[in-house]
Image (cartoon, rainbow, N blue to C red):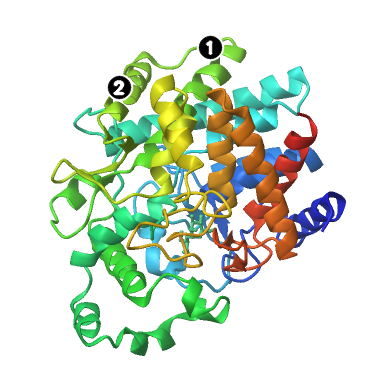
Amino acid sequence: MNEESLYSLATKVLKTNDLGHSTKPAPRLYPHQWLWDSCFISIGLRHLDPQRAKSEIFSLLRGQWSNGMIPHEIFEEGAAYHAGSDRWRSDLVPGSPKDLHTTCMTQPPVIAEAVVRVGEFLTAKDRQAFYAQVLPALINYHEWLYRERDPQHTGLIALIHPWESGIEDTPYWSYLMHDVAPLRVKTLRIFGTEAVLDRWRPDLRHASREVRPSTTDFYTLYRLFTRVRAKQYAFDRVMRVRNIPVVQDVLFNSLLIRANHLLGRIAAEIGTTLPSALQDAMRKTPYAFETLYEDGHYWSRNYRTNELIMAPSAAGLLALYTGTISQDRADVLAKQVTSDEFWPAYGVASVPTSSPYFNPRRFWQGPVWINLNWLIADGLQRYGHEKIADDLRRQTLAMVGRGKGMYEYYSPLDGSPAGTHSFSWTAALVIDMIESTNST
Ligand code: 2M8
């Protein structure tokens, strides 16, 4: 598929998934609004219609809780989804919005990046007005992150559920999930008969079993969710329950470092400053982040035991995106990006091929994801690795073009598409990558 057809197909997918005020990630499997999806979507939409890109962000802010949390999903009335609003019951939790149903936890903080990228496509006057409108909400969100998720002032944010990471089936989460699986899953696992649970999995109507999370992981995600809900999603109460993993997630904290930096930029452009307590908290994060480095890689940390979870995945490569790690460490990571393990035929594999968890076409366990490629390319470029960044973007576009659709993810071994089709962030970031490769 040539670039022009790719661009127009991507545009069509965004139109098809447009809900008016926001964009759903995919027509059927993901019918609501998701936090980091909408951020990536707005980065694509800015090329098509900057005002619509703005509304994608305002739409996210509708869901903000009075304590500052921006939830990971805002539910659309009546749309069928495997973990819908009736499971969450945000209406029963103090501080949730009155007129909307949302989830009660968050997702990676890409919103400051989205605001800045959209701002680049506005006139100076419109940009400043936009920044002034969203900045208080972003400050509240970052304050909530530090207040609620870093009560010990470690400098790193801890997550209470794999869904908050956005990459829930990545090996370090799977590793922790293994031990806390519900009893019936453990029993079925012993006999190798987990497949009997498949018929209760509505998601399998929209994508095949082989490419979706394993049944074991799926049911563990649900069970963990029930445990967190029983504690009203509150960090201090969750911490009292031993069988809920709590993780200082490397991807989340990488994105936070960059978001903090951009928050400062947004404030500066409109002639204001961030609250000093927030600045103090933010300053600590890049230093604390370095404690995640060992043996040439950045890892997530088990917050309960203080141990690094040394199960490799592309999440550790996101350290490149922070902009705060040293050039030496960035060079080490850039080498890993281009290694056979992370770039066997198509880069970047979400899990390296050498990992026992590697599965080229299964959800977050090996496939190439377009959002990770976008973030990694952005980081590589900031560290002077423009050539690798450019190769990565061009190869990504060629791979998506060959798949003849905007798929959720792709095999790093042969570039074949997997997951659901008409996936919005693939479409949006394809548009952005086409624009950026044409301007270099
Ligand atoms: C996937 O996660 C949702 C739950 O949040 C799911 O499995 O139903 C993840 O890929 C996540 O990163 C993404 O935001 C979401 C929607 O695309 O789907």
- Residue tagged 2: 287
Q: Amino acid at mark 2?
A: Tyr
- Mark nearer the viewer, 1 or 2: 2
Is 191 positioned to the left or the right of 381 in the image?
left
The residue at the far right in this view is 4
Determine which quarter of the picture holds residue 380.
top right
Determine which quarter of the picture holds residue 169.
bottom left
Residue 294 lies, with reference to residue 233, above or below; the image says: above
Point 19% across, 45% down: residue: 236
Point 38% across, 46% down: residue: 95
- Secondary element under disc 1, as helix, strand or loop, is loop
Report the disc number at residue 272: 1
Say whether disc 1 or disc 2 marks the residue closer to the N-terminus.
Answer: 1
Residue 141 lies, with reference to residue 82, above or below; the image says: above
Q: Position of residue 299 (x, y in %)?
A: 30, 41
Q: Amino acid at mark 1?
A: Thr
